[in-house]
């Protein structure tokens, strides 16, 4: 069974590469074959082809979030802007923002150079407002962009007419557009990237669950890798490694893909620019128009499983699927009332502050990157290039970005972690309901955003 419709489109889950057996010596051992691990391996080999680089993947490359996501190559690093300013100053926050904007074109460059056929289209991204309240929030976000030093080339407020020029949203009153985003078919990207990693001389072992990591060594049931550097690139699955249960919470996101919409429906909806799209709610829905004329959209399902369990291979519950389908009609009207071709879910890694981090412990030869929350497709490329510089000992603009440093603070132990994440989810849901009813901002949503550390 495929873990996502994206893999379904590729003909199902791929035949795994052989597992690791016996002992292998390397310079760098990367644990995890998603975007983070693969970009890191790719960048290291491109920079220094004499480095022996080995990737160990529990299932197959792309099994995790990298083969299941919404396909937004988004020029955003998660976490509240206030949090980044606190961490890196205004200059550091702006440098991080510029670096992640540039990453969208960097991904495009490699996709082109490696001939990765992944439906890449850079159409930007659009947040749509269906009420004055939602539009007010976008105005505040735009003002915040300007205050940081971003310009019209980064963030454009749209009125109802300008929005309708791009896409017809039921009751759409405006939007916020940024050019810094591309759409991809995510499984095609991760599988193509894995092939690029191998072409550039790194080895990938699949069906190889790593049981433990220590300085100089990563081991599994049938073998081990001895290396100067061990890189942890296990994102939401980090919780399964000994001693790391509270580093990143595996938070769920669920998606559906529709059957292709008829040409007449697309005429009604517009959306010719293939912008990725977000609605204006607190518990938001994210969407893309696929290369073959479907809408793939996602949102939060059952938010978190007790004890940081990560198994999300079965389809999401019927009420989650139905909720997403209804949202589609709320946004696009009857034109989008078509069948659901696939439904799936996955886990994303969320740090206690909602900020990702990239780090090395030089003395022990350990490195890691992750905690991107829902914004890891582009950020994992920036992280991979940053890890490359850190591991080869280069002092660059990337290694001075404010996300480089120790991991964010740990999550609370259970049952607090479960109670906290579910409470925030319920508050957000209640805030959306209250705001839909009254048209006024709900305090509940602000409380939830503040206690989760996610920001507004
Ligand atoms: C439904 C969904 C929608 C999303 N939409 C978007 C989006 O549109 N845009 C965006 O920017 N981000 C999105 N994200 C987040 C994004 O997909 C992730 O941030 C990104 O894929 C993280 O890549 P990664 O390589 O760090 O982690 P993963 O892709 O999760 O890779 C980790 C890998 O490590 C392997 N692994 C784990 N433990 C071990 C072990 N012990 N031994 C060996 N291997 C191990 C796993 O099998 C997995 O393949 C979404 C996530 C989900 C779940």
Image: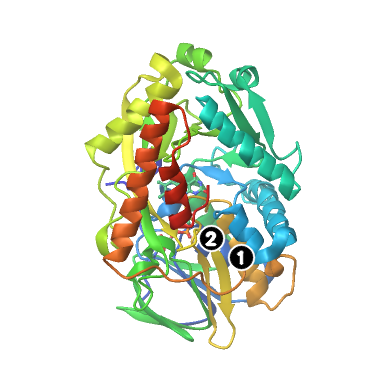
User: How packed is label 1: few (under 14 Cα within 10 Å), some, or many (20 or more)?
Assistant: many
Which quadrant of the figure has residue 50? bottom right
Residue 108 is situated, as x and y percent measured from the top left of the image, at 65, 46
Above/below status of 138 relative to 267: below
Residue 153 vs residue 383: left or right?
right
Judging depth in this view, the residue of 205 and 374 nearest the camera is 374
The response on whether ligand 1 sits within 8 Å of label 1 is no
Residue 392 is situated, as x and y percent measured from the top left of the image, at 67, 77
Q: Which residue is mark 1?
A: 403
Q: Secondary structure at mark 1?
A: loop
The disc placed on residue 350 is: none
Q: Residue at x 26, y 43 (%)?
A: 315
The answer to which of marks 1 and 2 sits earlier in the sequence is 2
Q: Residue at x 40, y 22 (%)?
A: 330
Q: Residue furthest bottom?
A: 363
Q: Secondary structure at mark 2?
A: loop
Above/below status of 308 relative to 124: below
Above/below status of 327 relative to 168: below
Residue 124 shows up from this direction: no
Q: Looking at the image, do the residues carrying marks 1 and 2 touch, with CB atoms under 8 Å apart?
A: yes
Residue 200 is situated, as x and y percent measured from the top left of the image, at 60, 63
Q: Which residue is mark 2?
A: 355
- The number of numbered discs placed on residues in the rendered structure image is 2
Q: How is the image coloured?
A: rainbow
Ligand 1 found in image quarter: bottom left
Judging depth in this view, the residue of 21 and 193 nearest the camera is 193
User: How packed is label 2: few (under 14 Cα within 10 Å), some, or many (20 or more)?
Assistant: many
């Amino acid at each position: 069974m495929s873990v996502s419709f994206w893999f379904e489109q590729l003909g199902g889950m791929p035949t795994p590469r052989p597992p690791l057996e016996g002992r292998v010596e390397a310079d760098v051992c990367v644990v995890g074959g998603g975007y983070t691990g693969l970009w890191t391996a790719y960048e290291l080999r491109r920079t220094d082809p004499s480095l022996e680089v080995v990737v160990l993947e529990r299932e197959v490359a792309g099994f995790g979030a990298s083969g299941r996501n919404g396909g937004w190559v988004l020029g955003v690093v998660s976490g509240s802007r206030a949090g980044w300013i606190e961490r890196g100053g205004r200059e550091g926050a702006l440098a991080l923002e510029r670096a992640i904007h540039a990453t969208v074109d960097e991904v495009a460059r490699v996709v082109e150079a490696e001939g990765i056929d992944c439906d890449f289209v850079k159409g930007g991204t659009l947040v749509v407002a269906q009420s004055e309240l939602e539009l007010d929030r976008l105005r505040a976000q735009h003002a915040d962009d300007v205050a940081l030093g971003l310009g019209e080339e980064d963030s454009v407020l749209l009125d109802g007419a300008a929005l309708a020029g791009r896409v017809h949203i039921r009751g759409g009153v405006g939007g916020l557009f940024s050019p810094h985003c591309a759409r991809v078919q995510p499984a095609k990207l991760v599988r193509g990237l894995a092939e690029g990693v191998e072409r550039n001389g790194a080895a990938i072992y699949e069906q190889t669950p790593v049981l433990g990591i220590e300085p100089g060594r990563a081991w599994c049931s049938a073998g081990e890798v001895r290396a100067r550097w061990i890189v942890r690139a296990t994102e939401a699955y980090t919780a399964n490694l000994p001693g790391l249960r509270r580093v990143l919470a595996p938070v769920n996101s669920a998606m559906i893909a529709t059957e292709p919409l008829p040409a007449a429906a697309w005429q009604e909806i517009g959306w010719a620019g293939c912008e990725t799209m977000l609605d204006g709610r607190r518990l938001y829905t994210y969407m893309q128009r696929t290369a073959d004329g479907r809408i793939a959209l996602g949102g939060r399902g059952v938010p978190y499983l007790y004890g940081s369990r990560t198994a999300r291979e079965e389809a999401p519950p019927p009420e989650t699927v139905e909720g997403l389908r209804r949202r589609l009609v709320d946004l696009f009207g009857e034109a989008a009332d078509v069948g659901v071709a696939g439904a799936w879910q996955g886990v994303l890694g969320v740090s206690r502050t909602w900020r990702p981090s990239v780090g090395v412990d030089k003395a022990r030869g350990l490195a890691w990157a992750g905690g991107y929350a829902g914004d890891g497709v582009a950020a994992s490329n920036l992280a991979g290039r940053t890890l490359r510089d850190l591991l080869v000992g280069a002092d660059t603009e990337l290694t001075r970005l404010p996300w480089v440093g120790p991991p964010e603070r740990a999550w609370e132990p259970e049952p607090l972690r479960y109670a906290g994440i579910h409470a925030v989810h319920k508050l957000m849901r209640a805030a959306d309901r209250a705001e839909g009813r009254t048209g006024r901002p709900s305090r509940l949503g602000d409380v939830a955003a503040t206690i989760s550390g996610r920001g507004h």
